[in-house]
Image: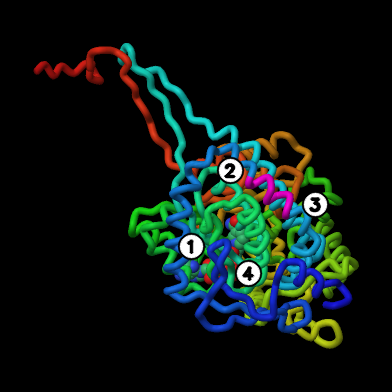
Amino acid sequence: ASQFGINEALEKLGIKFINEGTSTGLNNFSSGEILDSYSPVDGKLIASVKMSTAEDYEKVMQSATEAFKTFRLIPAPQRGEIVRQFGEKLRQNKEALGKLVSYEMGKSLQEGYGEVQEMIDICDFAVGLSRQLHGLTMHSERPGHRMYEQYHPLGIVGIISAFNFPVAVWSWNTALAWISGDVCVWKPSEKTPLCGIACQNIITQVIKENNLPEGISCLINGDFTIGELMTSDTRIPLISATGSTRMGKIVAQAVAGRLGKSLLELGGNNAIIVTPDADIKMTVIGAVFGAVGTAGQRCTSTRRLIIHESIYDKVKEALIAAYKQLRIGNPLDENNHVGPLIDIHAVEMYAKALNRVVAEGGTILVEGGVLSGEGYESGCYVKPAIAEAENSFEIVQQETFAPVLYLIKYSGEIDNAIEKQNGVAQGLSSAIMTNNLREAERFLSVTGSDCGIANVNIGTSGAEIGGAFGGEKETGGGRESGSDAWKIYMRRQTNTINYTTSLPLAQGIKFDL
Ligand code: NAD
């Protein structure tokens, strides 16, 4: 790690050997147990975090509640200025934070930097948006009346995030929540607690420099038990939760039980349809990056390739050849394509999936396996694998968070491929590779892809911040980031003003006194 400047990065980000896991923006404290963060890159202890207790959580909630009372009064464009300064701080810390993301989570350094760049981009987007939180005006049916709608700040936004995007998901939420006048309480993944500490340290500088109310950005650390305090807390009107479908179902029920709002960003099972008119070279690039990028640990990773039988062998051979070129190793070394999985548990799930696909009748085309020896001491490095499978296999129906790609054959018309693509419980990202306009439009039409993201001649993996991000079905239905995703962070109010001297009732109802 020292050769890649990790120690300097930790120092710049204010990470100590033992960190207080609870923060109200200016005050850091914690009275819980110690959580050690080991790097999947080399298996070494990076640093530790004291977890938050129920008492710590209560202090955070009081601070956030107080902060909201004053923060909501700051005009939205001035809140935008705060987010602009936050974006500047991120620019100054991009290298250090990108390195920490890569070292604590295991994604490649380029992807680590890319994640921080996404944070910067959403800040820019939010700054512009801070002058555009528009409502509509409507024509009243009554004479002398004006009707319009406005958006007010919502309150405390609870953010529960996953390990695989340990910093960006927080910023997608906070940048929009802050310009909306909300305050945030964040519980990062217990697998990447230091990324949470680092982000909180960065925003703390902005809070200090602007004399902002403590509590606009709060941090708690811990496992699902501390998450449960948030989901059942009526003081939190919106819970934004990113993670597995299993978690989403529990969180959604807890939040719905108190009629709170939830924004869910859950698992995907993303496919690329490859038609006879596909550009094979583009297909291979899109599929390989989609399947092995972040070692298959993106919610938008490509898990299934649905290939027309007429070009099946050609695509298969090209993929096998491409997989031979892959270099697996330390993700901080820019020569490597594939880094480690997050932990040993993820390695077990990967190995299980490969056994399962064979047991269900699939054929392994590119052999997997866990790597050992020099450079692989953490035990988290695995070989990206390809298997021939049927869409109906139980294992294919599940999201395995690892670099396992399933090749599925289709014959006949494009509708047969779309049926397979839609034939899973998840609905996050999808793509078609084709130069045939009819096929592409069919894929995007009402009878086409049922996913939140549908691409043509681009893979499934990743997304620009300008669009609304999220998916349907078991992906949870939430939308984050661009477009009008900001609306969920505000409460909408419809206002009718009567500027006459009489009070006509709606629908012509007479009520003479
Ligand atoms: P996970 O579900 O194990 O954990 C996610 C977060 O939820 C963690 O912070 C965890 O502590 C918390 N949590 C778990 N149970 C909880 C409960 N009962 N109450 C409150 N909080 C609880 O997920 P993970 O392994 O960290 O991440 C991988 C998953 O996340 C994959 O399924 C992936 O597809 C999904 N993901 C989705 C998106 C998206 O935008 N759709 C983005 C990133 C990751």
Which mark is in front, 3 or 4?
4
At x 57%, y 73%, the residue is: 21
Counting residues from the start of the chain, the first of labels 3 and 4 encountered is 3
Q: Which mark is residue 400?
A: 4
Q: Position of residue 424 (x, y in %)?
A: 55, 58
Disc 1 marks which residue?
Answer: 248
Q: Residue at x 57, y 79 (%)?
A: 50
Residue 12: image quadrant is: bottom right
Rendering coords of residue 456 (x, y %): 72, 43
Circle 2 sits on which residue?
Answer: 79
Q: Is residue 165 visible?
A: no
The mark total stands at 4
Q: Mark 2 or mark 1: which comes first in sequence?
A: 2
Q: Nearer the viewer, mark 1 or mark 4?
A: 1
Q: What whole-number distance in Å separates the C-alpha atoms at marks 2 and 3?
A: 43 Å
Residue 85, labelled with which disc? none
Query: Which residue is under mark 3?
Result: 283
Q: Amino acid at mark 2?
A: Arg
Dot 1 beta carbon under 8 Å from ligand 1? yes
Q: Amino acid at mark 4?
A: Thr
Question: Which numbered mark, 3 or 1, is in the foreground of this view?
Answer: 1
The numbered mark, 1 or 4, whose residue comes first in the sequence reads: 1
Above or below residue 191? Residue 216 is above
Q: How far across and down, in percent of the image, does residue 375 sit?
A: 84, 82
How far apart in space, not on screen, are marks 3 and 4 (Cα)?
A: 22 Å
Magenta segment, which residues?
82-89
Label 4 Cα neighbours within 10 Å, binned few <14 / some 14-19 / many ≥20: many
Residue closer to the observer: 327 or 130: 130
Query: Are dots 3 and 4 in contact, CB under 8 Å?
Result: no
Label 2: state its secondary structure.
helix
* Above or below 367: residue 211: above
SS of the residue under disc 3:
helix
